[in-house]
Amino acid sequence: MARRTSHRMGPSDVVILVMGMTGSGKSQFVSKLTGENAGVGHTLTAGTVSLDLYSCVENGQRIFVADTPGFNDTQISDVEILKDIAFFLGQLHLRNVRLGSILYLHSITDNRVSGLALRTFNMLRALCGPQALNCAALVTTKWGALRSPKDDLAACDREKELMYTSNFWGSMRQHGSQSYRWLGSEASARSIVREVIQTSCQRTFPPVLQIQRELIDEKRPLDSTSAGREMMARYEDRCQKVKQELDDLRSELLSASGLTREELNEGEAEVNRLMDELSRSETCQHGLRVSQRDLFDQKTGEYKQLYQGIWEEVEQENQLISEIGRRLSAFEQRLSYLEPKTDSTKGPATAENPPVPPRAGTWATVRRFLKRNVLPLLGVLAGVGVVAAGAAVINPPLIMAGAQLLALSFAGVQWHTDQGVDGPDLIAGVEGVIRACPPTPITAGFRMHT
Ligand SMILES: Nc1nc2c(ncn2[C@@H]2O[C@H](COP(=O)(O)OP(=O)(O)O)[C@@H](O)[C@H]2O)c(=O)[nH]1
Ligand SMILES: [Mg+2]
């Protein structure tokens, strides 16, 4: 998988997988959608990997789009393509990345659903499984290639046939799968993607595809998955037919007499061709017999470049989220530690229940109060002193003078400030200061029971 995108995939992103026969317009669709060159008209094979990943943003949502080759690709075997798709979908499931949809592209100019189209479609069904058929959407393409109203009418008839034929999209529609026309433009591609993602986001629990469940949850070998079995049955069938053809040809050649040198050479060439085909089919069957672990080991190596960036980013984001959660709970713990109510229920301060420092603003409140009222408070103190002295010498005029000084000074105390700090705040401040003190016999008596 050549990494065509420079963006990193994260847990909040959505993935769209594009499937369909070679030539159905997959790369053209991806190019229009993402604005990146997806290699239209080419089979995109970079080394042994076949999926290409691109990205775009729609309505603020990052979307990753995976372009796949058709199952009839000339450069890469169907087995490798299935392995790549299975591995990619498996990774999404493993890492909880949402699959928005599998778009199945089909050219409306194709006069009939060919055997190859049916095989590709059956593979799609096997990948999704009956529970998740609505994850796939049919997208008909090449509407712009229609040249006359007659062509248009014929195309509309074909579209109906595709959508209602039970062994094609008819069965998918019954399971809630949608179909769209791609009109060749970026706007049309974006509107399709918007709709499929909207539908996907409406599902609280995105369905798990059959291949994801079989490979990841049940850890089955590829040839035991539905998609693997579907492909294996095809190869077995083909092998049997080729063997039969070989036997027929051999006995024909043996029984024939008087064959010319040329005819013998032709016969030999045909035998060799059939033998090659048989050997390729057997190699493919062998390739399908791979355990989940070996498949992931093999593909992880091949896709290393692509995934290193993508999955590391996902891991980092997950780690960041848990770090933030950890810090948040530590912070909450500290907050509760500063909460007066909690501590007063625990009794006197101990090592486990340390004395609570006054709230940040309370010391300041007391300090501000004292600063603001230096003179009146000194007056109050002096008044108290004069009253006490008058009482000591039993001198009523002195007591009266002290009481007057006391009353005047007390009246001068400024309880309010410009910032609106008033009595209750001051009391809270004093209370905070008292709480902060170790429980001496004096301060213990001042513990508030709120
Ligand atoms: N007229 C027309 N041609 C298209 C359209 N989409 C794709 N093609 C052509 O079909 C060929 C195959 O397209 P491509 O995207 O490579 O198909 P893929 O094999 O499915 O990736 C290319 O020559 C494209 O130019 C379309 O909507 N209209
Ligand atoms: Mg292509």
Image: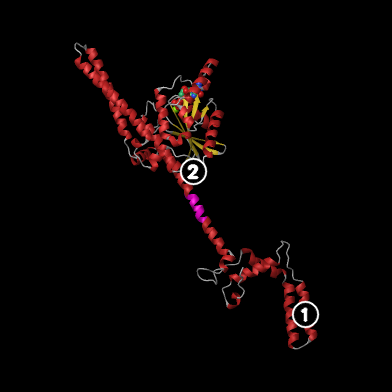
Circle 1 residue: 403
Callout 1: 10 Å neighbours few (<14), some, many (20+)?
many
Going by the numbered disc 2, the residue's amino acid type is Pro
Say if residue 2 shows up in the picture. no
Left or right: 417, with 240 as reference point: right
Instruction: Answer above or below: position of 195 versus 440.
Output: above
For label 2, the SS is: loop
Quadrant showing the C terminus? bottom right
Q: Where is residue 177 drawn, in percent x and y? A: 49, 32
Quadrant showing the N terminus? top left
- Highlighted magenta segment, given as a residue range: 319-327
| Magenta highlight: main SS | helix
Left or right: 433, with 157 as reference point: right
Q: Where is residue 339 drawn, in percent x and y? A: 58, 64
Left or right: 258, with 345 as reference point: left
Q: Where is residue 208 drawn, in percent x and y? A: 44, 39
Q: Which is nearer the eye, 309 or 178?
A: 178
Circle 2 residue: 11
- Image quarter of residue 67: top left
Residue displayed at 73% across by 81% down? 385
Q: Which is nearer the eye, 426 or 111?
A: 111
Residue displayed at 55% across by 71% down? 347
Question: Which callout, 2 or 1, points at the residue further toward the start of the chain?
Answer: 2
Instruction: Answer above or below: position of 258 versus 361.
Output: above
User: Does the closest atom of ligand 2 sit within 8 Å of the Cβ of label 2?
Assistant: no
- Image quarter of residue 438: bottom right
